[in-house]
Image: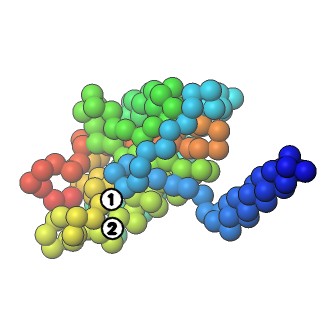
Amino acid sequence: MRILLKFHWQAIFFLNMLLLAACTSTPSTRIIDQTPTRRVAPEAINTSTLAMQSAQSSPDSFGLSDLHNRWRQPLGITPLRWSSNLATSAQQWANALQQQGCQLQHDPRTAYGENLAAGSHLTAASAVKLWAKEAANYDAHTGHCMNGEVCRHYTQMVWAGSQEIGCGVAYCQQFALWVCRYNPPGNVAGYRPD
């Protein structure tokens, strides 16, 4: 009787967890600097997508330069050009992060500007949308983020001095990790994006 009762409570708990997950079915997304890091065990990495990502990442098959330029054009900023060198560099960093369990962190050795985003089923368009949402946190009059809010992903996207972009993506099961690099880098202290 005790074993049956214990199983009954475990089943109820499990069903409640499934119901909670179904009620909160929005995909989890993160951009660096805004939420805690989620670590995925290296053995959970889905390596079957590695060949696919290499084939898709050149040249700009995800349309990332166009997605960025949609935000630059209304501001009168010169469009970004796709750089296969930056894309290779970004892909190498995405692969390195994948091998480390997909923990979001900026490359401390890069000379380029860099935006990171990760989440379940995160597409190129939704990664750019996450960064672009930060426009609401940017004060164009002061050239700073408002009230300690995060806006530096957005300002890197629209940094007038940046002329090239290249991006890469790595996967950990259904978890996509995007890395975009910009040359020259933006977010230079003492300067404004425009």
The disc label shown at residue 154, or none: 1
Q: Is residue 183 left or right of residue 92?
A: left
Quadrant housing the C terminus: bottom left
- Distance Cα–Cα, label 1 vs label 2: 6 Å
Q: Quadrant of residue 77?
A: bottom left
Q: Is residue 108 left or right of residue 69?
A: left
Q: Residue furthest toward the front?
A: 1
96, above or below 30, in the image: above
Dots 1 and 2: beta carbons under 8 Å? Answer: yes
Picture residue at 42% right of the left edge, 30% below the top: 93
**Local secondary structure at mark 2:** helix
How many discs mark residues in the rendered view?
2
Picture residue at 51% right of the left edge, 32% below the top: 101
Report the amino acid beneath label 1: Tyr
The disc label shown at residue 48, or none: none
| Crowd rating for badge 1 (residues with CA inside 10 Å; few <14, some 14–19, many 20+) | many
Q: Is residue 181 left or right of residue 27?
A: left
Q: Position of residue 38 (x, y in %)?
A: 49, 44
Picture residue at 41% right of the left edge, 54% below the top: 35
Q: For residue 91, say whether it is visible.
A: no
Q: Quadrant of residue 68?
A: bottom left
Q: Position of residue 37 (x, y in %)?
A: 43, 45
The residue pinned by badge 2 equals 135
Q: For residue 67, say whether it is visible.
A: yes
Q: Position of residue 65 (x, y in %)?
A: 44, 50
- Label 1 or label 2, whichever comes before in sequence order: 2
**Local secondary structure at mark 1:** helix
| Crowd rating for badge 2 (residues with CA inside 10 Å; few <14, some 14–19, many 20+) | some
The residue nearer to you, when weighing 174 against 2, is: 2
Picture residue at 73% right of the left edge, 62% below the top: 16
